Amino acid sequence: MLRSLVLFFSLGILCPAVEGGKLRVIRTSHDGWNDCVRMSNGLIDLVACPGIGGRVVHFSRTGKTSILLVNPEAKGKSPPRRDKPQDGGIWHPWGAFLWIAPETPASFLFNEPYTAVITKDQKLVMTGQPVPFTNTRKRIEIQMAEDKPKVRLDFFLTNVGTRSIRHALWCSFIVPNGGTVVAPTSAKSRFKDGYRKMHPFGLDQVFRTDRHLILKRLPAFKGYMEFGADPEEGWIAYHGKEDLFYKEFPVFPGREYDGQCPIKIYSDVRFTELESLSPLYEIGPGQTVSYWETWSLY
């Protein structure tokens, strides 16, 4: 599928025409944040900021512009921490992050600071603080390939309470508007037209082929839209001005998902979110569930 997407977007090559160098993982500052970790292999660069909720705030080919969107007004600032489930606060596009589903006021308590450890095998491990309103703790492990433009992210959700909870891991990757989003669909979809129309405004900009859903947001459209899909394949692609971003993840047909969708796409005038979800898990006290994604840039 990845080769087909590269040809579809007429990039002409499957991999960059440069060789990767030695993998380096270092602590650094970035865009006004002082507690960041940079990973680089000579092909791609990734910057994570544990202190603002374990977010990835930069992902690019080496020497190029990041394909992730971070609100310029929010750079170097800490996001608002919500001390009560009903608290409000300003939400900014902050790169890529891990939420939990179903979506409730408490599920937006995703600003807790994380600790960061760099292991001997150059893996970054970020661990969040316990969130009392959901009785959860999140952990993210990031491993960059040494010679490919690819990273793997493993996500973990632990029940730190005394009762069972029911959640899914929900992974969001925010990109600028102006590119093209492609996601798979299925002939066996339970939804009419092969996808779920969650916020139908502007969905005339979503086109379906036999195997794909394609979103090309029109600059004149000032509203927002959201749709979900229930494919048998787990991937989303985004073709920006310079790069093809491709994220892959497992899907489990027949398992229960939040909204019955392992893929969700949200878009408004500020940004577009590429979202993947795990199945819903019944998590007992002390138990941990996991999910993974890989990210590639071409």
Image: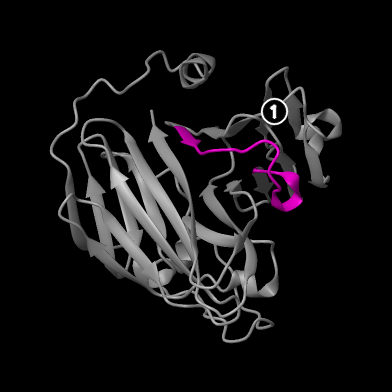
Q: Is residue 181 left or right of residue 223?
A: left
Q: Residue at x 24, y 64 (%)?
A: 117
Quadrant of the rendered structure where residue 150 is? top left
Q: Secondary structure at mark 1?
A: loop
**Is residue 181 something one can see in this rendering?**
yes
- The relative height of residue 68 versus residue 178 in the rendered view (above or below) is below
- The relative height of residue 178 versus residue 109 in the rendered view (above or below) is above
- The relative height of residue 75 versus residue 177 in the rendered view (above or below) is below
Range of residues picked out in magenta? 245-262
Q: Main secondary structure of the magenta part?
A: loop
Residue 67 picture location, percent across and down:
43, 43
Name the amino acid, label 1.
Thr
Quadrant of the rendered structure where residue 227 is? top right
Q: Is residue 21 left or right of residue 3?
A: left
Q: Residue at x 69, y 61 (%)?
A: 102
Residue that label 1 marks: 185
Q: Residue at x 39, y 33 (%)?
A: 297
